[in-house]
Amino acid sequence: MIIAVIILIAAGGFLVFGRGEGKGAALPGAAPATALSGQNAVGSSSSALSPFGENAGTYADSDLGFSFQYPPSWTAEASGASSARLVTVALPAKNQSFQVYVTPIDDPSITAITVAEIRRDLPNLDIRSPENIAVGSNGEGKGVSFLSTLSGVKGDVRQVWFAANHEFFQFTSSVSSDDTLTTVLKTFTIGR
């Protein structure tokens, strides 16, 4: 049931920025991430290891214990309580964005998000081209990537859902941002 509430919250926020068009290639399973130097807020990173270059932006959340990098021309804005977060990363001039919704998982037995679990909680959710993924430096984020549709959004959206560190992560993006999202997931780190 937690998944049903999450998709409704994140979909509403995605409507603000995510009216992307076009169809992209399927998002490949995310490769393990490169470790990031610790930062505690949205800002710029000077890490030479970033696939986005030395001026990459970094979103780091010390409350929830995760971070990722994004292209230098994009912006990141977070909202939510200390136990849940909605992060919107956008390039408004090009009408591109993705969102990350993070919330605690109360059931400690849930260590991965699966298509079967999603279909059990959201039987009417459009799930196409699902692919199992592992995210994080040690592949500790386990879940699924798939194409879907959202009411009010033109074209397909990419959904990447995974569980890690007793948190549920939901990345949502227009398929036109698949390449950016793939690279962001390669920089994703988890840990408290």
Image (cartoon, grey):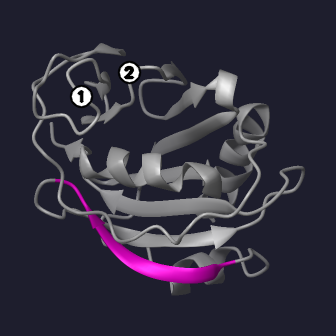
Q: Residue at x 52, y 72 (%)?
A: 26
Residue 104 in view in this figure = no
Q: Image quadrant of residue 52?
A: top left
> Where does the magenta region start and end?
127-136
**Residue 191 sits above or below residue 87 on the image:** below
Q: Secondary structure at mark 1?
A: loop
Q: Position of residue 72 (x, y in %)?
A: 38, 21
Magenta segment includes 130 = yes
Q: Position of residue 127 (x, y in %)?
A: 66, 78
Foreground residue, 182 or 4? 182
Disc 2 from disc 1: Cα separation: 8 Å
Q: Residue at x 13, y 45 (%)?
A: 34
Q: Sequence-wise, which precedes: disc 2 or disc 1? A: 1
Q: Position of residue 95 (x, y in %)?
A: 70, 33
* Relative horizontal placement of residue 75, taking residue 175 as reference (left or right): left
**Residue 146 sits above or below residue 178 on the image:** below
**Residue 153 sits above or below residue 30 on the image:** above
Residue annotated with mark 1 = 53
* Relative horizontal placement of residue 5, taking residue 89 as reference (left or right): right
Q: Residue at x 60, y 37 (%)?
A: 97
Callout 2 environment at 10 Å: few (<14), some (14 to 19), or many (20+)? Answer: some
Residue 160 in view in this figure = yes
Q: At label 1, which amino acid type do we have?
A: Gly
Q: Secondary structure at mark 2?
A: loop
Q: Image quadrant of residue 71?
A: top left
Q: At label 2, which amino acid type do we have?
A: Pro
Q: Residue at x 79, y 78 (%)?
A: 124
- Give the number of the disc on residue 165: none
Q: Are the residues tagged 2 and 1 within 8 Å (C-beta)?
A: yes
* Relative horizontal placement of residue 127, taking residue 140 as reference (left or right): right
**Residue 170 sits above or below residue 89 on the image:** below
Residue annotated with mark 2 = 72
